[in-house]
Amino acid sequence: MGCAYTENFLQAWCNLAERGQIKTVYPVREAIHSGTQVEIGIENSSGNAKYYAKESSPSHMRRLDGEILERFVEGTDFVVQFNPFRGYRPGTNKPEFRDGTENAPKPGAENCRFECQETKSDLSLLKRDPLKQVLLKNNGRYNLYYNAFPIEETGHFLYVPVERNGIKESLPHIAQVLTEISIEDTLELCDNSTDSILFFNSIHAGATADHFHIQMIPHLKTLKDGTPLRDGKYALERAARGEYGERKILEDYPIRGLFYSNEDKAKISQDILHLQKKGIPFNWILMGGNSYLLPRKKEFERVSEFSNILASVECLGKMVTSDRKIYDELTKESIHRAFGKMSYSVEELRGFGISSAASGDYDVCGNCVIRWCGGAGDPCSDCPHKS
């Protein structure tokens, strides 16, 4: 079932590319001549989905040069991808090499970057026909849309909740925050998506739209030139895992994180909800029946080693950049340095409630969201069991 589920989506992607329907057109504000536009999209080239970009005006049209390149970072299982097309995105600023926090996307439907209530540009979800619609066990209904600026030419999707009232459907504006129900929905989507990678970027961990969405890309086994991934796995999948009480923690990996089987639904939900309550940004990555939860330091949302914000795909082990110099010069040392800034230590994880206490050493307080009482770490200030 899962394989067919994924294959149907990938086939729908290819069909849209063949019809020229995966594209975004937007005005170039800095253009010398008024009326100049850039079109970016995916086309079907000799049976293969391929990125393209072109600039047009009333008097001319030209293709914009670009080729996606990929290589391994020497001495690692990390991949770096040079994707010049993502550099054409509207609002893409001059590269910034600095440590710090970005301004969060403005909340509310009127500021939604998906333009979920009113079409203002080609970026609006209302202008994209959904590739598919899925109905889940919790009666959650999701539309599957193409990402306007895909990382993978062969498929990059957005799952977005949809409401149905009779025969009428709408896209409710829901903030980019997970709930117990949407966590269960995401786990179900992963269970039905063989050879795919699903991920959630929280605000200040790579999310550029404050509208609830889960992203999905195919789990490719090779680089663009056909070079295979080691054992067909990304760096995150190959990371060693150590025991951490009732949880497992990533070892010998540039960013500290927690590992779960997707069968551990209660622990996954508890830890995610706790991070959100504490205001801690995170990336949640799901693949191969497993989950990886990567808490992030907000003050290092942006790091000086890279010109773009690092999100789930980079944490996975695929560094995507539209800067050719970064592509050419990226090293193992710079990856470890950058992720080291972003990452919490084991002691910090324990300190804000991701406990390493063994089973029976703590109780879960029903009045708090994942707060351990009587075990490792400090109990929360509002906990009635605080001594």
Image (cartoon, helix red, strand yellow):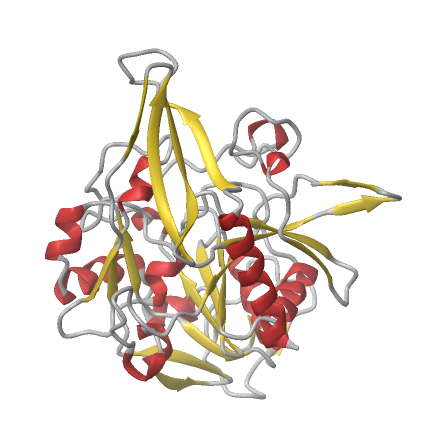
**Farthest front residue in view:** 46
**Farthest left residue in view:** 329
Q: Is residue 12 left or right of residue 66?
A: right
Residue at 25% in and 66% down: 225
Q: Is residue 293 above or below residue 125?
A: below
> Can the viewer see residue 353 in this picture?
no
Residue at 15% in and 60% down: 334
Residue 56: x and y in percent read 35, 24
* Foreground pick, 332 / 338: 332
Residue 356: x and y in percent read 45, 80
Residue 327: x and y in percent read 17, 54
**Farthest right residue in view:** 166
Residue at 41% in and 65% down: 294
Report the quarter where the N terminus lies: bottom right
Report the quarter where the C terminus lies: bottom right
* Quadrant position of residue 112: top right
> Can the viewer see residue 191 in this picture?
yes
Q: Is residue 321 above or below residue 270?
A: above
What number of labels is visible?
0
Residue 144: x and y in percent read 61, 53
Residue at 38% in and 31% down: 90
* Quadrant position of residue 271: bottom right
Q: Is residue 135 left or right of residue 255?
A: right
* Foreground pick, 163 / 355: 163
